[in-house]
Amino acid sequence: MDHDEFVRRIEVYLKLDLPEVEEARSIAEALGERLFQYLRQPPVPLTANDSLLEALLPSNALLFFRAAWDGNSQKYRPIVQEVAGPLGRLLVEIDVDDLVGGAIAAAYSVRTTPAAAVGLPARGRVVVGVRAADELVSRLTP
């Protein structure tokens, strides 16, 4: 969201919540100038060719995309841990709600948890949702 959109939203909320205030635009502009710096901007998406992404992730990683609030992720963790060994992969857990984890999830186009992936984005494999161990192995094996 850019600065102008932020100010516009403040103005809309002021008009809705305090319709008697006549100076909503000037108040929104004043607040926008001071508060915009605190607005959390989305992370810059990583791409499949990004050397930073390759440096962050071990080449033999099995990525487990999870969210702390997602009960399915918590229940699925033992299956993903079980599968890492037979695949010869190092398990790396990615918290999608973390700033870096969210950027990695975006690079893999993971929009829901739980999910598992091997390889780099666009060249690897991604499995979304809970699967039995044998199905997960077959889907992640080239």
Image (cartoon, rainbow, N blue to C red):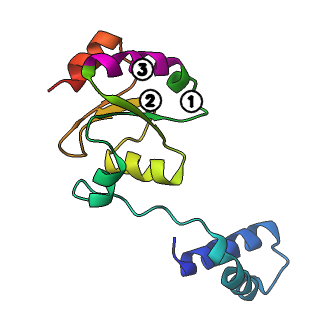
Q: Say what secondary structure mark 2 lies in.
A: loop
Tell me the chief SS of the magenta region.
helix
**In the rendering, at what x and y percent does residue 140 appear?**
24, 25
Amino acid type, callout 3 = Gln
Mark sitting on residue 81:
3
Q: Is residue 17 left or right of residue 111?
A: right
Q: Is residue 28 placed above or below 98 in the rendered structure?
A: below
Q: Do the residues labelled 1 and 3 touch (CB within 8 Å)?
A: no
Corner quadrant of residue 36 = bottom right
Q: Residue at x 30, y 28 (%)?
A: 89
The residue to which callout 2 is attached is: 114
Point out residue 53 in the picture as x, y percentages from the top left corner. Answer: 32, 53
Looking at the image, is mark 1 or mark 3 nearer the viewer? 3
Q: Are marks 2 and 1 in contact (CB under 8 Å)?
A: yes
Measured in 3D between alpha carbons, the distance from the residue under mark 2 to the one under mark 1, in whole angstroms, is 8 Å
Above or below for 130 versus 55: above
Residue at left offset 51%, top offset 76%? 2
Magenta part of the protein: which range?
75-86
Q: Earlier in the sequence, mark 3 or mark 2?
A: 3
**Amino acid carrying mark 1 in the image:** Asp
* Quadrant of residue 59 within the rendered picture: top left
Q: Residue 120 placed where, x, y %?
A: 24, 44
Q: Which of 89 and 125 is in front in this view?
A: 89
Q: How crowded is mark 3: few (under 14 residues within 10 Å), some or many (20 or more)?
A: some
According to the picture, the residue beneath numbered tag 1 turns out to be: 70
Is residue 84 highlighted in magenta? yes
Is 18 on the left or on the right of 133, as rendered?
A: right
Q: Which quadrant is home to the C terminus?
A: top left
